[in-house]
Image (tube, grey):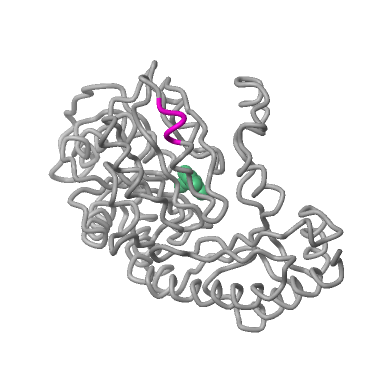
Amino acid sequence: MNIPFHVPYTDDSDIEAAVSAIKSGWTTMGPKTIEFEKSFAQYTGMPFSVAVSSCTAALHLALKVCGIGSGSEVIVPANTFVATAEVVLYCGATPVFADVDRDTHCISVDSIYRLLSPKTRAIIPVHFAGTPSAMDAILDIAAQHNLYVIEDAAHALPSWYGGKLAGTLGHAGCYSFYATKTLATGEGGMLVTRNEDWAQRAGRLRLHGMNRDAWKRYDRGGSWRYDIEEMGYKYNMTDIAAAMGLSQLKKVEMLQKKREAIASKYNDAFAASDALIPYSIKEGISAWHLYPLKINPEALTISRDEFIMKLEERGIKTSVHFIPLYRFSYFMNKYGNQEKYFQNCEWIFAREISLPIFPSMTDEQVDYVIESVLAIAQQFKR
Ligand SMILES: *Cc1c(COP(=O)(O)O)cnc(C)c1O
C-alpha cells in the first residue's frame, strides 16, 4: 500500500466555485474576496476579517497594526513553522524563542514567564496540530504585562477552547489556507480581529497601502484615483482562492470530524505499546491538522529517523513537526547554539513522527498505518 502524507480535500463544488470565479472575468481580489471575508467573520463570530495571500502575510500585518517595530521583542514557540518567527524579523523586531509543553507541543507558560523583558510587546501562541494553547494563562500574562496576543491559528480551523473558536481569543488571529492546511485554497490566509482600525489598516497594507476600495479601480463604477497613505505590501487574496474558500468553509466541521475519528483510532491503537506515546487532547477540541505520534527511544533499538525509514519502506509517508527554529543555520548564526535551553523541544524532536491524517483516508489506509507502526514497534523492541 502507498499512503501519502497528505491529500487535500477538494470536491466538485470547490472546483466549480474556482471555475466560476475564472469565468466571471474577475480573478484577483474582488467581490468573491469580500464575500469570503463576510462568511469568515460570520463563522468565527469576529466582526472583522481581512483576506490575504497567506497566513504569513496575516501574521506580518497583525504585528504591523499592533505597532511592533525595532526594539520590540515578540515571544514565539521554538517548535513551529519558521513563518511565526520570520514575521517578527520582517518588522525589525526580535523573535524570542520559548520552550514548549511535552504533551501538547504548544508554547510553555513557564517559559513565557522566564522570557518576559521590558522590551516584550507580544506573544504569538501556535495552536500546534490544532491543539489550543493554554490561552487562559497566556491572556492573563498579556493583561498583566500589557502585551498583545496574536494567535497563529494556521492549524486550528476549527479548534475550540472553552467553547470558543481558537484564533478568536487573543487580539488578532491568523489562519492559513495553504495547500496542506484544513481549508485549502492553494495559497491564502485570513486575519481576524475585533479592532476596526486594525482591520481597516490591514486592509490597506495588504494592497500597497492603497485606500481600502482601490481594487475597484478597474470596475465600471470605479475610479482611477487612489491614494497611498503608507507603504504597504502585495498581500491580497485572489477571487479564485476566495471562491474555493467560500465553498470549503461550509465543510470545515464535517472535515474536522473525519480527522478526529482517525486521531481517535490512532490513540486507541497506540496506547497499548510502551514504545509509543499517543497524542491526546486534554482541553478543548482539536482541528487535528496533524497527528503527532511520539516514539519512546528507551523502549526501542531504533531512532526516530530509522522508524521513519521503516514506515517509508512500507509505503507510508510521514513528516516531522517541527525542526526547532534554533536548529536552523540562519538562527544558529544569529543567536548561537541554543539547544541546551530547549529541553522539551529537543525531547519532542527526538521522538516525533507526524502520521498521515486527511479526510479522504480510508479505513483500510488507517488500519494499515496502525498495523505498520505497531509491527515496527514490536520488531525493534529493546
Ligand atoms: C503553515 C503555517 C504557517 C504559514 O502559513 P502560510 O499560509 O503558508 O503562510 C504559519 N504558522 C504555522 C504554524 C504553519 O504551520
Left or right of 15 in this view: 365: right
Residue closest to the eye, 67 or 23: 67
> Where residue 366 sits: x, y (%)?
64, 77
Left or right of 120 in this view: 83: right
Residue at (41% x, 68% y) in the render: 14
- Prevailing secondary structure class for the magenta stretch in the rendered image: helix
> Where residue 21 sits: x, y (%)?
34, 59
Residue at (72% x, 68% y) in the render: 274
Left or right of 286 in this view: 343: right
Q: Which stretch is magenta?
A: 112-116
Looking at the image, the residue that sits furthest to the top is: 71
Looking at the image, the residue that sits furthest to the bottom is: 364
Residue at (61% x, 50% y) in the render: 321
Magenta-colored stretch includes residue 204: no
Q: Name the image quarter holding the C terminus.
A: bottom right
Residue closest to the eye, 373 or 276: 276
Residue closest to the eye, 265 or 382: 382
Does residue 119 sit above or below 346 in this rendering? above
Left or right of 291 in this view: 198: left
> Where residue 159 sits: x, y (%)?
38, 62
Q: Name the image quarter holding the N terminus.
A: bottom right
